Amino acid sequence: MTIQLNKGHLIALSLSFIAVIWMIAGAVTSDSEFINPRPLTLDSGLQRVQVERMQGELVNRDITVSARTAPSRRVELKSEIRAKVVAVERDKGANVKRGEVILRLDPRDWPARVKQAEAALRQRQIEARSARELRQKGLANESQLAQAETALANAEAELTNARLQLNATEIRAPFDGIVDSRAVEIGDFVKDGAPLVTVLDFRPYLVKGHAAERDAANINIGDRGWAELINGDRVDGRIRFIAAEADAATRTFPLELEITNPNGSMASGLTATIHVPQPATHAYFVSPALLILDDNGHLGLKGIDSDNRVVFRPVNLLKADNNGIWVYGLGEQADIITVGGGFVDLGQLVEPVYVSEEVMNAGEQASDTSVNVTAQSGD
């Protein structure tokens, strides 16, 4: 039986034959081996990382704290008696001297009671003096003398109480300051304990803020500092107070910067920034991408120790700009992983490639290349 092959069959057989030959040739021919000039791991199996031996730059730094202005003293004067307001001697915003009357309350019958108590006291004094003389002469017994002295003591207490009640009708400034607010008007009836006026003392005034945990240990009472106010003014002062216990909610430490203020003029609650100068320290300029957090949330960098093991180097932020950040806390010198840090773990043994070595090797390769090119050109 004769099989007739047309042109299409011949083409299909030809293509099949070519495919078989190509597969056989591929199986016989071995691909050229790819050699990575900079392998991530060495023959020893250690991970390779790029390390830069950084030198710190000695810089001056300030601890900065967001703050606000405040008076050194603030007192809310309250009524000690039940009475009606009969006079306002000093209005809101007025400067007052210590002891100056701000408000007057109705004294009612207390002036008369004072006179009555004074007269009763004089009588009891005479009676007590007579009882002592009679006792000395044996004409009075011990009980009669004790009764006279008790009556004298009661008269003294009555006079003291009457004078206190009368004095309470005059609301006086407890110190030199400013009347900041007044809660009553003439004709108001107030109860004992009712707020009347608030007096502020701005001689000196304070700039109050809350220092972070990492900074509080470097601030001490008596340290010199300065504050930048919202209007751009700079005022110098000293640290008057820093808390020994952190705020439970914010984990920050309240502090106060005291500013000398002879004229006593200032507003409370103005935005300010406290600066507390610190000793010069070594700072490093790094990329933000190198920063990591440890298990406790502390900021740091990955570096290597003398045994070429990966270690955590804690740092503190100093300042930042568009090109990178400044950190401190590494000392004068530190070996920091700049490439490959994301592929190694803390405590892992690695093979460091220092930046200086890479630059030298690159220079040697460039030199060899130039020599070869020159020789070819000569031929």
Image (cartoon, grey):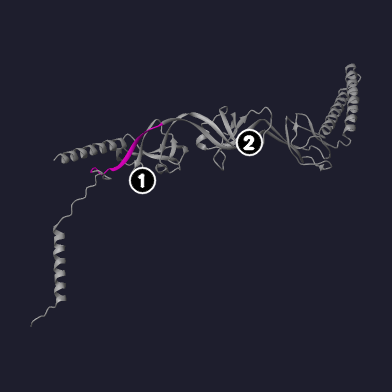
SS category of the residue bearing label 1: helix
Residue 231, picture quadrant: top right
| Magenta span main SS | strand
Q: Residues within 10 Å of mark 1 (few under 14, many from 20)?
A: few
- For the C terminus, the image quarter is top left
**Mark 1 = which residue?**
342
Residue 123: in magenta span: no
Viewer-proximal residue among 365 and 189: 365
Viewer-proximal residue among 311 and 124: 311
Q: Residues within 10 Å of mark 2 (few under 14, many from 20)?
A: many
Q: Nearer the viewer, mark 2 or mark 1?
A: 2
Q: Which residue type does callout 1 highlight?
A: Gly
Which residue appears farthest toward the front when viewing the image? Answer: 378
Q: Which residue type does callout 2 highlight?
A: Thr
Residue 288 against residue 203 in the figure, above or below? below
x and y percentages locating residue 197 in the rendered image: 75, 38
SS category of the residue bearing label 2: strand
Which residue appears farthest toward the bottom when viewing the image? Answer: 1
Q: Which residues are magenta?
A: 43-56
x and y percentages locating residue 298 in the rendered image: 45, 41
Residue 202, picture quadrant: top right
| Measured Cα–Cα span from mark 2 to mark 1 | 46 Å
Q: What's the mark number on residue 69?
A: 2
x and y percentages locating residue 60 in the rendered image: 48, 30
Which comes before the other along the chain, label 2 or label 1?
Answer: 2
Residue 263, picture quadrant: top right
